[in-house]
Image: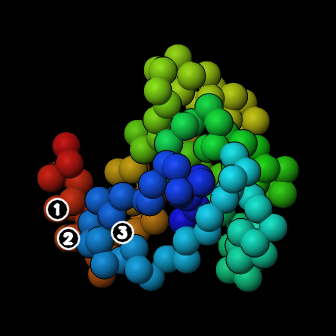
Amino acid sequence: VITQQYTKVFGQTVPDVFADPEDMKKCPIFEKKKFSMCTDEVKSHLKSLDKQSVVIFGIESHVCVQQTCLDLLEDGKDVHIIADSVSSQQPYDREMALTRMSQAGAFLTTAQSAAFMLMQSAEHANFKAVSKLTVEHM
């Protein structure tokens, strides 16, 4: 699921977020002005996916990411924040947001750790491709 904060002003999600930019076309994109991504439309879509765990990455850790995290925790979700894939303009804002989200019950992890946790084994069909990506981005 992709949310975009006031696209008219801030622009669209960068396709570079995906290893294959074509994958972006497979994701629903929701426009929002609310800082949290948990708009009624997004919450309805998430409910239809019937998932307990959510992985979050994005910009403005101390605003959009944090408010989304707190809303999802309040809704009883397991929230995983990809710490090396969130940012803020000021490093201190990012640091404080990560601390607050962790204290609220979110799991902090890294992109590489999350990828390997999701695969669980070197026998996973995408193991070689993911391993190659991690080496390229080290």
**Residue 126 lies in what quarter of the image?**
bottom left
Q: Is residue 75 above or below residue 137?
A: below
- Label 1 with label 2: CB-CB less than 8 Å: yes
Circle 1 SS class: helix
Q: Is residue 127 left or right of residue 67?
A: left
Circle 2 SS class: helix
Q: Position of residue 119 (x, y in %)?
A: 40, 69
Q: Is residue 44 left or right of residue 83?
A: right
At x 20% / y 48%, what residue is drawn? 137
Mark number displayed over residue 35: none
Dot 1 surroundings within 10 Å: few (below 14), some, or many (20 or more)? few
Q: Amino acid at mark 1?
A: Lys
**Residues at marks 1 and 2, CA–CA distance in whole angstroms:** 6 Å
Give the camera-side residue of 131 and 69: 69
- Label 2 with label 3: CB-CB less than 8 Å: no
Number of marks in picture: 3
**Residue 78 visible to the viewer:** no
Q: Is residue 82 left or right of residue 43?
A: left
Q: Position of residue 97 (x, y in %)?
A: 62, 29
Q: Which quadrant would the C terminus be assigned to in this image?
A: top left
Question: Which residue is denoted by mark 3 in the rendering?
Answer: 121
**Residues at marks 2 and 3, CA–CA distance in whole angstroms:** 11 Å
**Residues at marks 3 and 1, CA–CA distance in whole angstroms:** 15 Å
Give the camera-side residue of 50 and 92: 92
Question: Which residue is denoted by mark 1 in the rendering?
Answer: 132
Q: Position of residue 83 (x, y in %)?
A: 47, 39
At x 36% / y 58%, what residue is drawn? 14
Q: Position of residue 29 (x, y in %)?
A: 55, 71
Question: Which residue is denoted by mark 2 in the rendering?
Answer: 128
Q: Is residue 89 above or below residue 137?
A: above
